[in-house]
Image (cartoon, rainbow, N blue to C red):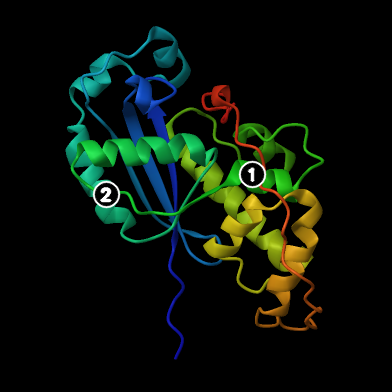
Amino acid sequence: MSTPAQPIAVIDFETTGMSPGQGARATEVAIVLVDRDGRAVDRFQSLMKTGAWIPPFITQLTGITPAMLETAPPADAVMREAARFVGSAPMVAHNASFDSRFWAAELALAGLPAPHAFACTVLLSRRMYPEAASHQLGRIVAHLGLPRAERAHRALADAEMAAALLGRIQQDLRTRFRIADPGHALLSALQRCARKGMDKLLAQHAAHSLPLPGMAQPPGPAACGTAPDRPLPGGAALARQA
């Protein structure tokens, strides 16, 4: 009897700035757990009180005010609850270089480790949909005809959109590339693979995947051995969800 596949935790932070290394803190966190078919099965969301100053332009962007955070639970309590919610699930974010830094920094301030592997839907959408004019969250979601949140730049709305994008990427990996189970390990490999090596990587995974109903298994050439993608520019963090 097979065991159920581990869910993936799709996370989004709203923050006071670009980098925890420069003193920025989280103001809100949201996590959507998705199953192997890309369906949302559970959600977590909370504002976070850190005492950090919120620049006016951040309040204008997110709608999160200092008064809202005054009555929010302490950040360390929120992060302990978030860590329990995620458990050992692998994680996904839209611009994971941004959210993973805040995940690690806020967990560290709560005295907790951050061993979770991250995959990035920005990098994955660049691989899967190179024709798209933009890979910012709202724009790539609109390009693919997925539901778009009325209120972007709030953590749960953005996490929901990122989860929908992840589900579409996994669906297209199944239908276009015959990947029976496009799990987190494949997503992590795909985001590191240059586009010219993508077909070889996916063909190898398809060759070692259980066949989908009505589909023959293709032969599997060598895995991607090309150089990884360049890192996201530092200024992309706040623009990632426009």
Q: Which residue is mark 2?
A: 113
> Camera-side residue: 144 or 134?
134
> Camera-side residue: 102 or 56?
102
> Camera-side residue: 119 or 148?
119
Q: In which quadrant is the N terminus drawn?
A: bottom left
Pointer 2 and pointer 1: residues touching (CB < 8 Å)? Answer: no
Q: Which residue is mark 1?
A: 123
Q: Position of residue 141 (x, y in %)?
A: 65, 40
Identify the secondary structure beneath mark 2. loop
Q: Residues under labels 2 and 1: Cα distance?
A: 25 Å
Residue type at numbered disc 2: Pro
Q: Residue at x 42, y 15 (%)?
A: 58
Q: In which quadrant is the C terminus drawn?
A: top right
Q: Which residue extends farthest bottom?
A: 1
Q: Position of residue 33 (x, y in %)?
A: 42, 56
Q: Residue at x 39, y 14 (%)?
A: 59
Q: Position of residue 207 (x, y in %)?
A: 73, 78
